[in-house]
Image: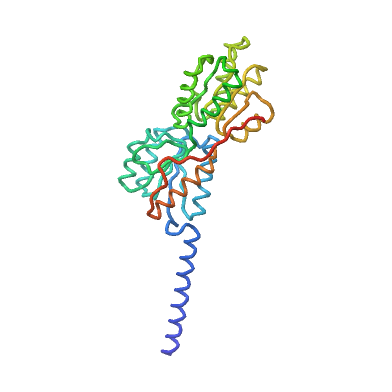
């Protein structure tokens, strides 16, 4: 009887050790020591095509690492985002990612997270003190790329409509760069700058453009439209096309599929800059993993490459 008990105990010990070894290997495949973590993904702009693309990519990449991802969308309400971020901090999340959000509007929450040793990362957001890092495109360079192309298409002269959304840090940086370029190009006059509402940027920019076309009916009154991102460009191009105006061109930034298709078909939308949004999320996930392993990030502001897209 004693011998039988000893044999059984030995078998149980062997099985237990094998199970422990198997579990350890599984964690290694799912992200090593960082497996089983929880990250909170916060944004006020989930309805945006590109923001949604980033959030979905972050969710997938987190799952690949064995992390649980909680997504919080406040539908354009940045004030509510601050409150929800405090909830995430209270829940003792392991990391926070803010997507397409100006971190200056979350300063106190970012400092609270830092005090609680919860790292805050940005995906196509800005970087401020207290954050760990932000991944984005080089917004100034993208603005130079698309603006210089537009100025060339305009022949260095004409009347320009600017559609922007300055609360978004990336769009703000692009618009500020445009302002600098316009100051150096005296032949181009900014007729008006209009703030496009979010959510609903395509519909909003279309309505704004319809009004502008009605008040600027004569040929040459508007030569071109510079839009800070593709959804605003799409709405403007739709309005121009519907009005039958052949004398106005539009540019955007993002390279989303609808914009690229409109460029291909020869609509008033003639160019965009393709951002690598999935590339941004890959950078963020890599940096989160480094932090979870107790290693330093590779930089506080890291860029994913972008490229100009025209019909050619």
- Residue 192 in the figure: left or right of residue 240: left
The image quarter in which residue 156 lies? top right
Q: In percent of the image, x 56 and y 30: which residue is there?
A: 230
Q: In percent of the image, x 48 and y 73: which residue is there?
A: 18
User: Where residue 249 sits: x, y (%)?
Assistant: 62, 21
In this view, the residue farthest toward the top is: 218
The correct choice, above or below, for 310 with respect to 8 in the image is: above
User: Where residue 217 sits: x, y (%)?
Assistant: 61, 10
In this view, the residue farthest toward the right is: 265
The residue lying toward the viewer, choosing from 231 and 70, is 231
The image quarter in which residue 105 lies? top left
Q: In percent of the image, x 49 and y 58: which residue is there?
A: 30
User: Where residue 293 sits: x, y (%)?
Assistant: 40, 55
The residue lying toward the viewer, choosing from 119 and 206, is 119
- Residue 239 in the figure: left or right of residue 182: right
- Residue 145 in the figure: left or right of residue 94: right
Quarter of the picture containing the C terminus is top right
Quarter of the picture containing the N terminus is bottom left
The correct choice, above or below, for 101 with respect to 87 in the image is: above
The residue lying toward the viewer, choosing from 141 and 128, is 141
User: Where residue 120 sits: x, y (%)?
Assistant: 39, 43
Q: How many marks?
A: 0
The image quarter in which residue 147 lies? top right
Q: How is the image coloured?
A: rainbow
The correct choice, above or below, for 121 with respect to 247 in the image is: below
The correct choice, above or below, for 107 with respect to 202 in the image is: below
């Amino acid at each position: 009887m004693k011998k039988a008990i000893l044999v059984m105990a030995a078998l149980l010990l062997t099985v237990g050790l094998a199970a422990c070894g198997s579990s350890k290997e599984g964690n290694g495949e799912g992200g090593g020591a960082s497996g089983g973590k929880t990250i909170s993904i916060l944004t006020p702009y989930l309805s945006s095509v590109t923001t949604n693309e980033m959030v979905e990519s972050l969710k997938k990449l987190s799952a690949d690492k064995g992390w649980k991802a909680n997504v919080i969308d406040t539908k354009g309400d940045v004030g509510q985002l601050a409150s929800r971020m405090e909830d995430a901090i209270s829940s003792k999340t392991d990391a926070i990612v803010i997507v397409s959000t100006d971190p200056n509007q979350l300063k106190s929450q970012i400092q609270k997270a830092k005090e609680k040793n919860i790292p805050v990362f940005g995906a196509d957001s800005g970087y401020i003190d207290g954050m760990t890092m932000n991944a984005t495109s080089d917004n100034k360079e993208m603005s130079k790329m698309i603006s210089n192309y537009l100025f060339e298409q305009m022949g260095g002269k004409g009347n320009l409509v600017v559609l922007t959304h300055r609360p978004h840090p990336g769009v703000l940086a692009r618009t500020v760069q445009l302002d600098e370029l316009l100051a150096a190009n005296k032949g181009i006059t900014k007729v008006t700058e209009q703030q496009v509402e979010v959510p609903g940027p395509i519909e909003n920019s279309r309505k704004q453009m319809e009004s502008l076309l009605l008040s600027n009916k004569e040929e040459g009154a508007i030569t071109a439209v510079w839009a800070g991102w593709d959804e605003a460009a799409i709405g403007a191009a739709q309005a121009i096309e519907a009005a039958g105006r052949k004398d106005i061109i539009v540019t955007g930034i993002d390279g989303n599929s609808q914009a690229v298709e409109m460029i291909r078909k020869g609509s008033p939308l003639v160019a965009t800059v393709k951002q690598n949004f999935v590339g941004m999320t890959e950078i963020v996930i890599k940096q989160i993993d480094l932090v979870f392993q107790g290693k330093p990030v590779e930089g506080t502001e890291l860029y994913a490459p972008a490229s100009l897209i025209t019909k050619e």
